[in-house]
Amino acid sequence: MIHTLLCDLLGIKHPIIQGGMAWVSGPSLVVAVSEAGALGILGAGNAPPSLVQAQLREIKARTQRPFGVNIPVFSPYARDVVSLCISEKVPVVTTGAGSPAALIPPLKEAGIRVIPVVASAALAKRLENAGADAIIAEGNESGGHIGDVNTFPLVPQIVNTVRIPVIAAGGIADGRGFAAALALGAVGIQMGTRFIATRECPVHDNYKQLIVKAGDRATITTGHSLGHPVRALRNPMTRAFQEMEKIGLSEDQLLEFGTGKLRLAVEGNVTEGSFMAGQSCGLVHDIPSAAELITRIVAEAEAVLRTLPQFATNDD
Amino acid sequence: MIHTLLCDLLGIKHPIIQGGMAWVSGPSLVVAVSEAGALGILGAGNAPPSLVQAQLREIKARTQRPFGVNIPVFSPYARDVVSLCISEKVPVVTTGAGSPAALIPPLKEAGIRVIPVVASAALAKRLENAGADAIIAEGNESGGHIGDVNTFPLVPQIVNTVRIPVIAAGGIADGRGFAAALALGAVGIQMGTRFIATRECPVHDNYKQLIVKAGDRATITTGHSLGHPVRALRNPMTRAFQEMEKIGLSEDQLLEFGTGKLRLAVEGNVTEGSFMAGQSCGLVHDIPSAAELITRIVAEAEAVLRTLPQFATNDD
């Protein structure tokens, strides 16, 4: 077991958060992760509130444990999903893709724990001041929408900047990464890519197999010209997008080409889908159940934590 | 004290390597780092062999401790500097910016420890097969010439791939990063940016002050269109280079504009210089002596290593 103050803050057994992934982290994964003692997060994406409501009710029918919802700030339904989280008494909300400062007060008033995902020390500080309960410091190695600072330097800089607890995200897929995150000053980890390759994740098996087979350099980033870089596996779709950016297609043309491609990936379309994934994909070699995965990673991290003091000697 | 097998491999007290930085890590820094019990590395860059020879003789006159030379594979003088390292009995050679496979056999025959700096698991494996004694796994957050995989996912993937010892580099500037590197499976760390801001580093004070003042998002990368991305501090020079890449200047025009800009930085030219630095710059807040820095980082890391087991509880 590994116990940190994040366990007490959220009422969970293991200080592990499953990253909220639009169209990917549906109720079956959320329930499996939360039942295993970590925190499952429903990815609301830009899904209509009626769908999110049905998913929330399914989750609540299947687990009594704490869980969360991830709300991307850019979603046209962001405020509706905030209202839904309040009416459905969701315990935790994480946010991403922008500053959620305006969304924090209503959530806090309803007693919901708010944990923004951020990519810079400056935004972490602003959101601490806006009332966030904790911060997920997400490095550039993550899958999906990313910032420009990498996990290793980002986490300690955010730990230096805020007083609220910091969770490390980006590039973590095993117990070594979990232990390293604690060494950097984090009180827990968030993993996305690693949880895609679990039995309960409701994506097509092709998506899981692509992650299992991927190596360290399997991902590329696109969308720099749009100001919203995205990391995904290298495939015909992402290479085509990269080429379209290089030759200077307009923002409208790029957005039109990119829209809906994550859903194609979720459905298993290996040539046209955008298989969002982080650089930790090269550390993923199997498709266990979420519970097996969590047990294994905690055991690995515990072994690392107990072994590390051997390097500290008393010689001078 | 922190003792790992890297100490035994290189005959050093602390498993810390000062990254070899062209025009930056000159004899005064190398001597200070090696005298403090870590491994100082002369950055040969593309300097002519006569200059490197004079620097080597100065280093050997001032310290009996192990030290090294970094040879960038692309240097027109790479083979000459290899010969020089052999004739001058340099204990350790690190290499960068490409595959040094062809340079390894003569160095090994002369009894020199060879430690390539690599940015992917595939190259690490090839160089282990070519006879490398250890591997420096350098993440994308480093300063200067960089690869595309970040430290957090890169280090454990290279540890999984090779049997020789792995040193972590990129984004490390304090004892938390040192401890985290050990958690990821590394046996030591290499730091570049942190050592620029030391008293003995022979660069203009402007360079050191820019690093001290920099925040987490202070760096940008340029040179993607040339296939050789470089990370440096955001300033008028790097912004201009970025703009020239965006409008599609030719490779020759870009190379002409970029050449010599690191030397201008070393001389303190804040508008025209290319101040190469990694994302760890936001963790650097002072300009200590190299010895003070090493003592402090070891003490911090030791404290982290001794504290971490508290998170592992015996509850089930």
Image: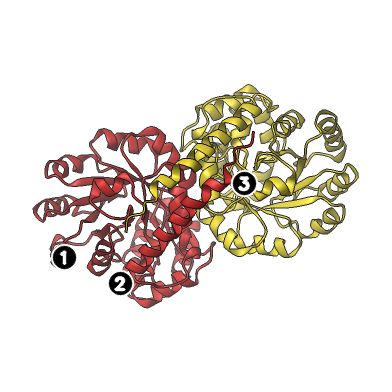
Chain colours: A yellow, B red
Q: Nearer the viewer, residue B122 or B31?
A: B31
- Judge from the rendering whether residue A279 lies leftward or rightward of residue B63; answer left or right: right
Chain containing the residue with disc 3: A
For residue B2, above or below residue A69:
below
Q: Residue shown at 40%/67% (left/top)?
A: B275
Q: What x and y, as percent, mark residue A218?
A: 49, 35
* Residue type pointed to by label 2: Glu
* Residue type pointed to by label 1: Leu
**Disc nearer the start of the sequence (2/1):** 1
Q: Secondary structure at mark 2?
A: loop
Q: Residue shown at 65%/29% (left/top)?
A: A290
Q: CA distance from mark 2 to mark 3?
A: 38 Å
* Residue type pointed to by label 3: Gly
Q: Which residue is mark 1?
A: B51
Q: Secondary structure at mark 1?
A: helix
Disc on res. B200: 2
Q: What x and y, as percent, mark residue B60?
A: 14, 63
Is residue A273 visible in the rendered image? The answer is no
- Judge from the rendering whether residue A141 lies leftward or rightward of residue B73; answer left or right: right
Q: Quadrant of the C terminus of chain B?
A: top right
Q: Which residue is mark 3?
A: A188
Chain containing the residue with disc 1: B
